[in-house]
Each structure stands twice: as structure tokens, then as C-alpha cells.
Image (spheres, helix red, strand yellow):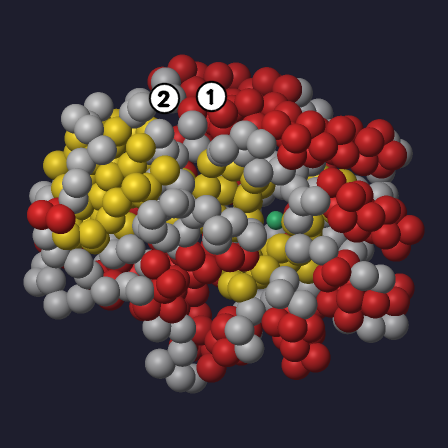
Amino acid sequence: MAVLRIDGAQIITMADGDSRVQDGWALEAVDGTITYVGPADELLPAGEPDERIDGTGCLLLPGFVNAHTHAAMTLFRGIADDMPLDPWLREKIWPAEAMLTEDDVYWGTLLGCAEMLRAGVTCFNDMYHLPRVGARAAMGCGIRMCPAGVLLGIVPNAEDMFEEAKTFTREFAARDDLCIHPMLAPHAPYTVPREMMERVIEAADEIGVPIHIHLAETADNVAAAMQTYGTTPIQAMDAIGLFEVNVLGAHCVHLDDRDIEIVAAKGAGVAHCPGSNLKLASGIARTSDLLGAGARVGLGTDGAGSNNNLDLLEEARLAALIAKVSTGDPTAVSADAALQMATLGGARAIFLEHCIGSLEVGKHCDCILVDLDAPHLHPRHSLVSHMIYAAQAADVRDTIVNGRVLMRDRKLLTIDLPKTYARVAECAKRLFPEHR
Ligand SMILES: [Zn+2]
């Protein structure tokens, strides 16, 4: 039995969305599961803690959930900026991805894990090639991951990719690994034809996993659906039964009122990716409307090729700011709403709210300690406001996943950073010799 105790910190539990700051509380976890969170003087210790963290001067809160990324794309950080989505994908990203080796995916994913753990991300929802390799990187460092092999219907080896993804997903779903939650990931309606999409839906239903897909990311995506299906991507996918299984739609930028109704009514998740949407000029998602309709909305960084970092706190701030300027309403997406999206909302968006997203007894102990000893975090009028409008990723001091301390005092304990940088440099040099 491994006991972890954290005391001395101020705590925001996010239990049922409660963002009040609690003073004088403690948290205890046994074998990765939270067994107590409440007043420190009422704690009946499960035993002598194997690990104790003094959180004095820190804020303890649930770890951030990155609801949409392609972690290994850290390898593509900065190779092709300032381009529109379509040529960016077709001319830069897909040709490079055609050359990817297992080594590339492993080290690229591990670099992404390091970056995310440093920024307080404890769970990421990933869509990429060679998911088995990406999952190996996550399992090695201990971060929580929802891996899914990307499915493209328009490539020659589409059927092989699909078979491989099904085998991987089936295998990991059966393993019941506490930190790996597989999904199936058809890339998008414009890259996966209807017939294949129907088989993916069937497979997700049969295996019992959610689907992770890009939806309505750009105006061009909507035009393509109009041409193929005669309606919007959301309504087209609804008509073929996509939303009968659990679905996480990444981006969901260009939605009409009917689309928003469908997303909310069918209980689909949305990964709002403001940084990527801004950089690719994809547009501004109707986040306030989605939240107002009761949709499950989380935040995603998207891949580092189009962001260019995996800092979820930055996404939370952008989500709050962009909602205000796009609606002309400074009350749109408050700090509280943004913090919800970064934590419990993200867990709901990827259908893991029963086990992560808040600090509650019975959930996995995924949490972070944010060091409040910084000029930009004084005076302490509102810690929720500070988290969204003032805090920086570098303020995260400790990151804990499933009760295991993966970063302590800003030092990663399960990833050898110098080695990772060196291996990533080798991969980058082979993939992009023209950049050296
Ligand atoms: Zn994406």
C-alpha cells in the first residue's frame, strides 16, 4: 500500500465544478486513488505516508486535461509556420509523416510528455501514427494518455491502418490499464469516406471506446461536407450515426445553431483549440454558445506544429480572451469557466469524468501544485483569476499522476531530458535535413 499525503496547500477541488479555495485542507491517496480530501485536522491517516508533499505557499488543483493533441508533432515545431491548414497538411506535414519511424514517434511523444508534465498537464488525448509506440512513451514516464491511431481513408494503406488501430484499441481496452484509455480516431469527415466512417463507428461501439475526430475545423471543411453530404460536417456525421457512440470532436469552429444543438443533445465532447485555430486562421469557435447549450467542452493544444507549444494554461487564457473579443462581451467565458474547461470540462469532453478532472474521493489522484511565490501572483484577490489571467506554466512546481510524483520542485523524475533532447535532435535532423 502506497500512501501519498499533501498538506499545507490551499486547495481547489473542482468537485462538481466547485472552484472555491479551501484553506487548511489536506489530500491523501492510497495506491493512486484519492481516499481523503478535506480539513487536515479531520484526516484519519491511512498509515504513515510513503510520500509526503508540503504544499505550503502553493495551490493544489486537479491536473490539466489536454483534450486534443498529436504529441509526437513536437518534432514539427517550427518547421512550417504561417501557412493555411490545407497546404500546411498536404505539403509539409503529411510528406514528413510518411517518413516517420518508431524512434521518431517515441522520442517526439516523450518530448511532448515532458513539456506537458512541466505545464501541469496530467492527461492528454492523442491522435497519431503508431499509437502503440506513443503509448509506450506515456507508460514509461507515467502520464495519463488516451492514445488512438489516426485513420486516413485517403491513403493507400488505409485498411492496414484501420486493422492495426482496431487491434491496438481492442488490446488496450482489454488490459484495463489505469493510465491508458484508448480511443479510435478517424482523422476527419473529409479524409475518411462514409463507408469507412460507418465501420469505425461500428468498431467503437463493439470495443466500447470513444471516437476522437477533427470536426468543422475550417470553413473549407464545411464546404467539403456540403459538397459530399449536402450538409454540415456535424449534421452529416449525425445522419450516419457518429454521435450514437461517445465522440470527442476537436476544434468544432464552424458550427451553426443546429450543429450546437446536436453536439449538446447527443452528449458529444468538444476540444476547443484556440491557439491552433488562431495560428492557422481557422476561425473562432462559438465556445460561449456551446457552454450555454450544456455541451462537454474541454481545451486542446492541438499538435506543436500548429501551436507551437503544449501549454494548456495558455489555451485556457486564450479561450477566455478570444470569447470576449469575438462576442463583444467581456463577461463571456469567465476565468472560472476557463478553469473548468482546463480540468473537469476536459475530463467530461473525453468521457473520463468518473475518474479524473476533480479532486474527489474515489478518483485517480491526478493533481498539480502551483507555486504562488511569484510577483505576478500577488496580491491574492482571486486565485481562480490568477490561474487563468496571470499564472504561467513555469509556476507549476509538482505534477502527480495516479498518485505518483512525476515532477517535484520543477524536476521531472521519470524523463531524462538531456537524453530526450539529443534523440529528438537526431530524429529532426533525419526528417528535415534542409533545416540543419
Ligand atoms: Zn488536430
Determine the CA span between mark 1 and mark 2: 8 Å
Q: Is residue 408 left or right of residue 344?
A: left
In-front residue for pair 221/110: 110
**Amino acid beneath label 2:** Thr
**10 Å crowding of disc 2: few (<14), some (14-19), many (20+):** some
Q: Which residue is mark 1?
A: 140
Residue 231: give x, y in percent of width and height. 82, 73
Q: Secondary structure at mark 1?
A: helix
Residue 119: mark in rendering: none
Residue 201: give x, y in percent of width and height. 79, 50
Residue 348: give x, y in percent of width and height. 51, 57
Residue at x 84%, y 43% (from the top left corner):
153
Q: Secondary structure at mark 2?
A: loop
- Asked if labels 2 and 1 touch by Cβ distance under 8 angstroms, the answer is yes
Above/below status of 317 relative to 89: below
In the picture as drawn, the residue positioned furthest to the right comes out as 195
Q: Is residue 393 left or right of residue 239?
A: left
In the picture, the quarter occupied by the N terminus is top left
**Amino acid beneath label 1:** Gly
Above/below status of 425 relative to 194: above
In-front residue for pair 314/139: 139
Residue 359: give x, y in percent of width and height. 32, 50
Residue at x 70%, y 44% (from the top left corner):
208
Residue at x 55%, y 44% (from the top left corner):
125
Location of residue 242 by image quarter: bottom right
Q: Which residue is mark 2?
A: 414
**10 Å crowding of disc 1: few (<14), some (14-19), many (20+):** few
